[in-house]
Every structure is written in C-alpha cells, then in structure tokens.
Image (cartoon, grey):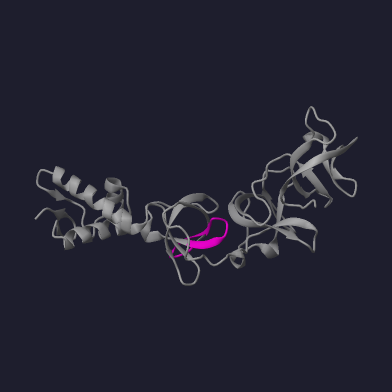
Amino acid sequence: MIKAGVNQELPIFEESQFGLYLGREDEKVLLPNKFVPESYKLGDLIDVFIYYDSEDRVVATTQTPLIKLNQFAGLVVKENTPIGSFMDWGLDKDLLVPFKEQHVEFREGSKYVVRLCDDPQSNRLIGVSKIKSFFLDAPSSLNLEVKYSALIFSKTPMGYEAVVDQAFRGMLYHDELNKSLNIGDEYQVYIKTVREDGKLDLALNIRGSEQSYSLEDKILQVLDQQDDKVLLLGDKSDPQAIFNQFGVSKKVYKKAIGHLYRKKKIILTDHDIRRP
C-alpha cells in the first residue's frame, strides 16, 4: 500500500514522459523526471518519500524530508499566507500549517515544533503545532542511565518543555540550566524522574544525584589546591561563577557542598567554602 508521509522502497513499474511510475498496475505513484536516477531498469527498487504535490496528487521524491508522518520536528516558517504558514521541511513543496492548527501566531523566519499529520478532510499532509494531545504517558521502566533526544517546543516560567524520544513530554528547569535553549532545537538529555502524571523531569548533564557525588571529589581537589584552603564559591555565589569553575548549575553545586558540609569535610558560608 502506498502511503503519504513515509519512505517506501518501490519497484519501477513503467516509464512515461513525466518520469517513472513506481509500484504496480493497480497502485502506482509518479517519480517526476527530476528525481529519476541516471541508470535504471524496470523492476529496480527505489527508496522514495511519498507526499502530495501542489494539486494534491500523491507523488514520490528522492529528497529527504525533515519530518515524517506522526513525527515531531522544529521547522522554519518561510511564508505566511491567508490560509496559514508554509514551512521548510526539505522538499520542493513547503508544508502548510493551517492557522487553526497553530498554538501561537507564527512569524516568518522563526522556528516552531510541529507534528506531521495526514488530514483526511483536505487529503494532504499538514503540520500541527497544537501537539500536547499527542504525548504518551512515560512508563516507569524508562532507562535512567542513557541519553534521550529532547526537542524543545515551549518556554515557560518554570523551564523548557520538550518532546522526549518522539513520544513523551518533559521539562528542563531554568534553575538547573546554565544557558538558554532554543525552541525547535534538539538536545541530548538524561531523565531525572518519571512523574506520576506520566511526564518527565530532565537534565542536560548526568542525573543530579550522580553528578553531585562525582562533583564532591572535584570540589575538594580544587579547594585543596588553594593556598589558604578557601574557595570563594558559597551558597549565595553567582551561578555563572559556579558554572565557570565546575561546569554545573548552582543547584547541583549547592547539593554537592551540602553533602560535603554534612560529612564535615568543609566549612560553609554564604560566599565561600573552606577546609576545617
């Protein structure tokens, strides 16, 4: 079955003046001349992406799209029109995101996260940026030891919301980050917590508890290298200064020095730590 929005490997069925027909007699699709390989023979298999052309006919292309059916991706708006916004998705024909499917008013040149959907009413592929209804509840069995892809789709007062592993909804919190993130960009993250509501708490670095413990040795090493055994980074120190020294957020650093303080390995003040 030939299906729009996905890649398929189809046999060359016949030639025409417009290109090659792929498939079989009762179900075939045109690969236009501009995508026809230099050498071929009938029956050869060609890997193509199936979509609708400007006249809503099913066609094949050897171009590689930036998004496929039921996937999420960050795409850039090329043009706003009376019917919606057209986005660059790597093909000759741009992807339409109708106004009714936009969670905010799109601006030309900006990037937004959309999901590619097959709209049965219009018989075309469309982009949808109202994506929250598509997320699955994350299972508690997710591996917390590996990295996952996180596609940033929204910035909130708490942090950045992300599509995790093309399926789940997660959050990276502002107070645990040392840099701004970009809507539509993809990052590698660790899962800190699988919440009861099926959402995920995320971290850019190694999971918080492990990072804190590995950080403790580094803090003591730096501290012992100081002539007076004093390091001017305490509870109320500037987050950027902490990141410049150790490459971690202030929250992670405070957790580590809290452990060291309870172990009586350091004396802790608002603005420095020191050896006893």
Which residue is drawn at the image coordinates 31% and 51% (left, top)? 240
Q: Position of residue 218 (x, y in %)?
A: 23, 47
Does residue 68 lie above or below 9 as drawn? below
Res. 192 image quadrant = bottom left
* Magenta region includes residue 160: yes
Residue at the (77%, 38%) spot, across then down: 45
As drawn, the residue found furthest toward the bottom would be 196
Residue 255: x %, y % from top left: 27, 60
Q: Judge left or right: residue 268 versus residue 104.
A: left
Segment colored magenta? 156-170
> Is residue 179 in the magenta section?
no
Q: Residue at x 28, y 51 (%)?
A: 214
Which of the two residues, 210 or 51, is positioned nearer the viewer here? Answer: 210
Question: Does 139 appear above or below 244?
Answer: below
Foreground pick, 6 / 115: 6
The x and y percentages for residue 141 are 47, 63
Which quadrant does the C terminus fall into? bottom left
Q: Quadrant of residue 267?
A: bottom left
Mark yes or no: residue 273 visible.
Answer: yes
